[in-house]
Image: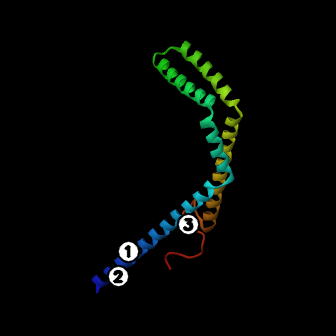
Amino acid sequence: MTEERLQQTELQSAARQHDHLVNREMILAKAKELADILGSSEEVQVFRKAEEKIQDHQRIQQLIATMKKKQKEIVAFESLKNQKMIAKIEAELQELQEELDGIPIVTEFQQSQVEINELLQMVIMAIRDTVAEKVNVEEGKSTSSSNCSD
């Protein structure tokens, strides 16, 4: 009889694990669905258009390439402990950054990144708040009045 009870318990445990996996798969499917919705949002469309313009903008690409080169030069001079050259290159890098920041499409691109981040934060907060209504997330306790020892 105890062997039969043990098998029954194992079957119940396996069924609970299966339900858990189905729920997890459902959650991930909904997350992917939400990602698709976010991907077609106005904020993401603006970001993609700005990103395309930046990729096609010759001067922006030149500035980015030059800035990367200057950053590598700084690293090299840091290893040589040549503070004078580091300061000179940092000043050049600052000028390049200011020119880059002065290009309107760069500002538009940066603003679109901010707007996407704000949208993602709103989604995260909505999920967190909704889950918090159901479960006391901080303490890991259910907000329902049921007791596991029942």
Categorize mark 3 by other alpha carbons within 10 Å: few (<14), some (14-19), many (20+). Answer: few
The picture places residue 13, in percent across and down from the top left corner, at 39, 75
Q: Which mark is residue 149?
A: none
- Tag nearer the camera, 2 or 3: 2
Q: Residue at 56% across / 24% down in the picture?
A: 66
Exactly how many numbered labels are in the figure? Answer: 3
Q: Relative to 30, does residue 146 appear above or below in the rendering?
A: below
Q: Which residue is labeled 2 in the image?
A: 8
Report the quarter where the N terminus lies: bottom left
- Secondary element at tag 2: helix
Residue appearing at x 50%, y 75% in the figure? 148
Amino acid type, mark 3 = Lys
Q: Which amino acid, mark 2?
A: Gln
Q: Residue at x 46, y 16 (%)?
A: 80
In the rendered view, would you say 84 is above or below 47?
above
* Mark closer to the chain start, 2 or 3: 2
Separation (CA) of disc 1 from disc 2: 10 Å
Query: Quarter-wise, where is residue 68 in the image?
Result: top right
Rendered location of residue 122, percent (x, y): 67, 54
Q: Indicate the secondary structure of the residue bearing disc 3.
A: strand
1 or 2: tag closer to the N-terminus: 2
Q: Toward the viewer: 48 or 112?
A: 48
Residue 108 on image: x %, y %: 70, 39
**Mark number, residue 14:** 1
Instruction: Single out the mark in the foreground, 1 or 2.
Output: 1
**C-alpha distance separating marks 2 and 3:** 28 Å
Tag 1: residue type? Ala
Residue bearing mark 3: 141
